[in-house]
């Protein structure tokens, strides 16, 4: 992508409405634009990052055996009346009526709808276990939306729903998602700590929030320091192995970790003083087991091996991609801008032409741009006639992991400079070596 043809409305000044780093940098880098209170458009640069986050989430959901579908954003109030949640959910739910005066709602979550899909299609235990997920817009009418897309009213959510014949089976499904979440956040460059949490309006009696530590986090968290040393489950983890996943779950829940709602002061004080950690954190995922809370009132049951009908045991598992993007920025930035992990960066590399219009610089940049693009790299080519300082500031602000800098003097010697955005390290190398650095 040539920067001269890309839509990226950079802001030079810090927006006054931005209270935290991620909100400020997302606005300055032209990633988002506020349309109304708590509602944002994702501009091309932000959309590229969001898509890469979603792809990692999908890959790990699929690896764990979940199957993707897509449910509508508008739901019938009748389903929520069946489950008993329509009146209980509160003012966060946006309630509307269609032209036939039928009560509808903009879905804040999908337990009722997925249960309706299940009960109409699955009748036998032989079709279990089953886990269905989608990545879809949700709406919750927050009293105080703030921090940009960190806490917005309209947001993207990956929500998965598991169905099992027994509690034991449901716990295995829970452990699958627990393990998948550890892998997902690690691939996004985050260390997320699973913490015992309140189930809230979702319901149930087993729940974990995945929290990344950050000073701007809204949650108060208490945990053991050793979580930072735990190994992440490998990509070849056998998700069908009950014992293996149970051991992963047991390891990651063996140390104390809880949000303020579930905090036990006595248990926390039992940890040696030097090993305690109390901090702020950002919730990036939440998983629940709630048994037959929805299947019983909504009649979601299957015939078991005993010939009798059984209400299925369910769980739900949420990740907020539109929250993850600012969370990654909160965890990875400096005074010059964003530092994207390579896995979710909007571009793999930016080629900076220091003297657009100069025949040698133009030719060198075109050569590098074409070679890297042909090799499948996502390349941004700064072909603008801006001053050098502006070009460097833009590249640092948007956080592309590597910069290939082509100036007249270096090009005359058959060389370019390669800069690592994260470390700031610069290396001068031949043009051929620079290309091979990214395609080898």
Image: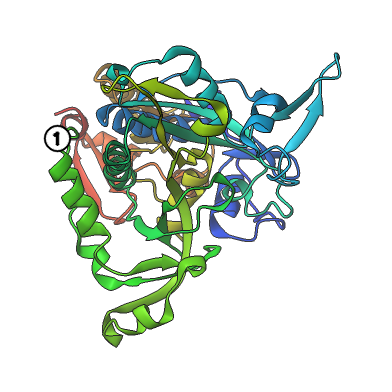
User: What is the quadrant of residue 196 in the picture?
Assistant: bottom left
- Residue 355: name its quadrant: top left
Q: Position of residue 59 (x, y in %)?
A: 31, 29
Q: Is residue 55 something that shows in the picture?
A: yes
Residue 195 pos. (x, y %): 38, 60
Q: How is the image coloured?
A: rainbow
In this view, the residue farthest toward the bottom is 273
Query: From what the image shows, is residue 376 above or below residue 294?
Result: above
Q: Nearer the viewer, residue 101 or 422?
A: 101
For the residue carrying disc 1, how many other residues have a C-alpha within 10 Å: few (<14), some (14-19), or many (20+)? some
Count of number-bearing discs = 1
Question: Which of 311 and 289 lies nearest the eye of the viewer?
Answer: 311
Q: Residue at x 46, y 63 (%)?
A: 281
On screen, residue 224 above or below 55: below
Please tell me in which quadrant of the rendered image residue 64 appears. Answer: top left
What is the quadrant of the N terminus in the image?
top left
For label 1, the SS is loop
In the foreground, 65 or 358: 65
Counting from the top left corner in percent of width and height, residue 259 is at 46, 65
In the depicted structure, whether residue 277 falls above or below residue 425? below
In the figure, is residue 218 to the left or right of 379? right
Q: Which residue is mark 1?
A: 238
| In the depicted structure, whether residue 106 falls above or below residue 230 | above
Residue at left offset 43%, top offset 50% = 328
| Left/right of residue 99 with respect to residue 58 in the rendered view | right
Note whether residue 336 is visible.
Answer: no
Residue toward you, 376 or 420: 376
Q: Position of residue 414 (x, y in %)?
A: 21, 33
Q: In the image, 248: left or right of 256?
A: left
Which quadrant: the C terminus?
A: top left
Q: Residue at x 70, y 25 (%)?
A: 78
């Amino acid at each position: 992508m040539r920067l001269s043809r890309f839509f990226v409305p950079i802001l030079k000044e810090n927006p006054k409405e931005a209270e935290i780093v991620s909100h400020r940098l997302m606005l300055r880098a032209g990633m988002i634009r506020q349309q109304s209170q708590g509602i944002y458009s994702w501009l091309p640069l932000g959309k590229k990052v969001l898509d890469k986050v979603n792809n990692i989430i999908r890959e790990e959901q699929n690896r764990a055996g979940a199957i993707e579908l897509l449910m509508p954003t508008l739901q019938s109030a009748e389903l929520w009346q069946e489950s008993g949640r329509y009146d209980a959910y509160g003012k966060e739910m946006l309630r509307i009526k269609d032209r036939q005066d039928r009560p509808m709602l903009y879905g804040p979550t999908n337990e009722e709808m997925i249960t309706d899909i299940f009960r109409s299609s699955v009748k036998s235990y032989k079709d279990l276990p089953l886990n269905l997920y989608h990545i879809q817009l949700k709406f919750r009418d927050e009293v105080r939306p703030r921090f940009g897309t960190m806490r917005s009213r309209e947001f993207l959510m990956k929500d998965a729903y598991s169905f099992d014949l027994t509690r034991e089976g449901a716990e295995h499904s829970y452990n699958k998602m627990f393990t998948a979440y550890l892998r997902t956040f690690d691939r996004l460059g985050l260390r997320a700590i699973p913490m015992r949490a309140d189930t809230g309006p979702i319901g149930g009696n087993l729940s974990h929030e995945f929290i990344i530590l950050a000073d701007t986090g809204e949650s108060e968290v208490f945990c053991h320091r050793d979580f930072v040393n735990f190994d992440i489950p490998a990509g070849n983890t056998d998700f069908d192995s009950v014992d293996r996943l149970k051991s992963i779950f047991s390891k990651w829940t063996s140390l104390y970790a809880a949000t303020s709602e579930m905090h036990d002061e006595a248990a926390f004080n039992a940890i040696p003083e030097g090993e305690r950690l109390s901090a702020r954190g950002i919730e990036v995922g939440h998983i629940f087991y709630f048994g037959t809370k929805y299947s019983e009132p909504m009649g979601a049951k299957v015939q078991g091996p005993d010939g009798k009908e059984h209400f299925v045991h369910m769980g739900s598992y949420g990740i907020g991609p539109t929250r993850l993007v600012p969370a990654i920025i909160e965890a990875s930035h400096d005074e010059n801008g964003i530092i994207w992990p390579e896995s979710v960066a909007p571009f793999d590399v930016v080629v900076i032409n220091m003297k657009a219009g100069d025949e040698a610089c133009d030719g060198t940049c075109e050569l590098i741009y074409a070679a890297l693009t042909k090799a499948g790299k996502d390349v941004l080519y700064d072909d603008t006639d801006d001053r050098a300082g502006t070009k460097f500031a833009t590249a640092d602000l948007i956080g592309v992991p590597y910069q290939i800098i082509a100036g007249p003097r270096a090009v005359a010697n058959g060389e370019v400079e390669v800069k690592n955005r994260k470390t700031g390290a610069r290396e001068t190398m031949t043009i051929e070596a620079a290309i091979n650095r990214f395609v080898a």
